[in-house]
Image: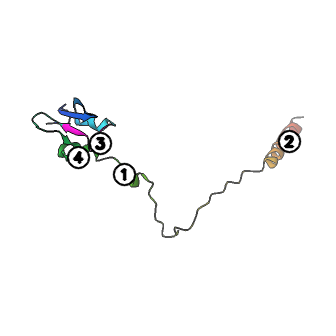
Amino acid sequence: MTPMQKIWFIQINGKKEGPYRALDLKRDPRITPDTLVWKQGWTDWKPLRDIPELQEIFEDEETDEEAKPKKIKDPLVSENDVLTLKYDPPNLYLWLLLVFIVIFAILFYIY
């Protein structure tokens, strides 16, 4: 039995659907660990969480803790220190004066 075989049936809101591949179940947003699944040869529907073959469906999902950015511990910085980056834009009037002087020098040189 390979993950590519369509052998799994599901029950969503009392409606039976399938067959699906395990990959299809993994991609379906309606699927939860409590979703009832069945395959040929079984007598009863079982919650997906009880099926060892389908445990991979939820394995790579991140928990809220894992999704948070990790803090990097730096021995030289305490947790109470705050790094503030301050951007001090150049003074507009100084730039205008510089541009005026350059243009004036060019014009004076040409004429």
* Image x and y of residue 47, in percent: 21, 43
The residue carrying mark 3 is: 32
Tell me: 54 left or right of 110.
left
In the rendered structure, are the residues bearing label 1 and label 4 in contact, judged by CB atoms less than 8 Å apart? Answer: no
Q: Quadrant of the C terminus?
A: top right
Look at mark 1 in the image and give the residue it sits on.
Answer: 63
Magenta-drawn stretch, dominant element (helix, strand or loop) = loop
Kind of residue at disc 1? Thr
The residues tagged by marks 2 and 1 sit, at their Cα atoms, a distance apart of 65 Å
Residue on which the image places disc 4 = 49
Q: CA distance from mark 3 to mark 2?
A: 74 Å
- Residue that mark 2 sits on: 105
Return the disc, 4 or 3, that comes first in the chain's sequence: 3
The secondary element bearing badge 1 is classed as: loop
Residue 34 forms part of the magenta stretch: yes
Q: Which residue is depicted at the point 9% across and 35% down?
A: 41
